[in-house]
Amino acid sequence: MSLGQWGGSVVGNDAVVVAQRIKHEGMAVTCILIQPTDADLQVARRAVGAKVVGVGTCPGMLTRSLCLEDADGSRRWVVSRHVRPSGDLEIHGAAILYLDYYPELRGFLNRATRQVRAGHSCVFVNLSDISSIAGVPRLPFTPTVLQASIGTVRPSKEAFRLCSQLRERTGAEYVFGTRGYHGAVLDTPAGRWSSKCTVGAKVGVLGSGALFSAEVIAGLSRGLKGQELLELVVRNTAASLQANEGYSIGGDKRIG
């Protein structure tokens, strides 16, 4: 759970954004936060409007974060407190399981998700920023969908090569590589596709990865595949960013 400044205060954790968006699609959702504070849970529940539970919840003020973005589009986060996750994840039986594999949580998630495919029809892993195959963590399970931000300056041919490597490494059926203002690519056993983005460079894209994830989940639930799926996801993500002027991420409630 993180609360950051981007032209206003917004609830910006990817799991919160995804839960909120797919709830609007009429899907039942439970959002699990890893070691949130009591204040984090309160704000997240208000924003999502659905079931939000904490693992290892602790007392404290709102967790705040600052996003630092390099010229190549890679990002790093400075968080107001140190998170040391522990405890068990109760995630059995979900039809679609979305896991945000923040670098700080990978060790915990690897321990907690060794049997994750049992009882789940679709497992979605968001790796955030990946610059090369060397930066991909070993997963203790085979995901259905893998999403990674692969940089805004990467040529299409190189983007396809990296996504193909990601699919070979993880065994995922769908690998989405997001490229900021340049759109996204999709690699599957059936083929690969690319789609350009209509968002201008002046529109902030913080939170776009979570919006993209939510649109993928919505599209897959409707049975979409290939180019049709990718174009719909890119188009809807761009429309959300344009509508919110790049700061109210995914329609999240503004705080303060």
Image (tube, rainbow, N blue to C red):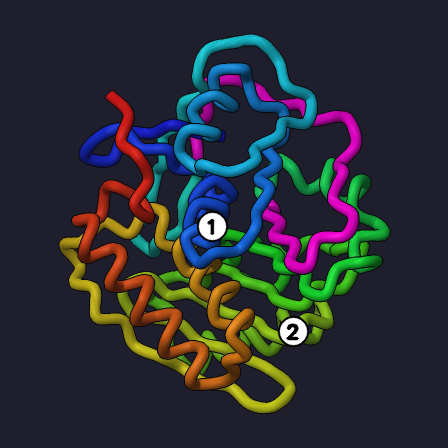
Would you name the residue on which mark 1 appears? 23
Q: In the image, is residue 89 part of the stretch drawn in magenta?
A: yes
The amino acid pointed to by label 2 is Arg
Residue at x 35% of width, y 54% of height: 208
Pair 1/2: label in front: 1
What residue span does the magenta drawing correspond to? 77-101
Residue at x 65% of width, y 73% of height: 167
Relative vertical location of residue 158 with respect to residue 15 in this rendering, above or below = below
Q: In the image, is residue 143 part of the stretch drawn in magenta?
A: no
Q: Nearer the viewer, residue 197 or 241?
A: 241
Q: Residue reaching furthest bottom?
A: 190
Would you name the residue on which mark 2 appears? 167
Residue at x 23% of width, y 42% of height: 247
Looking at the image, residue 21 sits to the left or right of residue 200; the answer is right
Q: Are marks 1 and 2 in contact (CB under 8 Å)?
A: no
Looking at the image, residue 51 sits to the left or right of residue 212; the answer is right
Relative vertical location of residue 47 with respect to residue 191 in this rendering, above or below = above
> Mark 2 or mark 1, which is nearer the start of the sequence?
1
Give the quadrant of residue 152.
bottom left
The amino acid pointed to by label 1 is Lys
Looking at the image, residue 224 sits to the left or right of residue 107; the answer is left
x, y percentage for residue 196?
Answer: 29, 77
Residue 78's label in the rendered image is none
How far is the residue under mark 1 from the one under mark 2? Answer: 29 Å
Relative vertical location of residue 38 with respect to residue 194 in this rendering, above or below = above
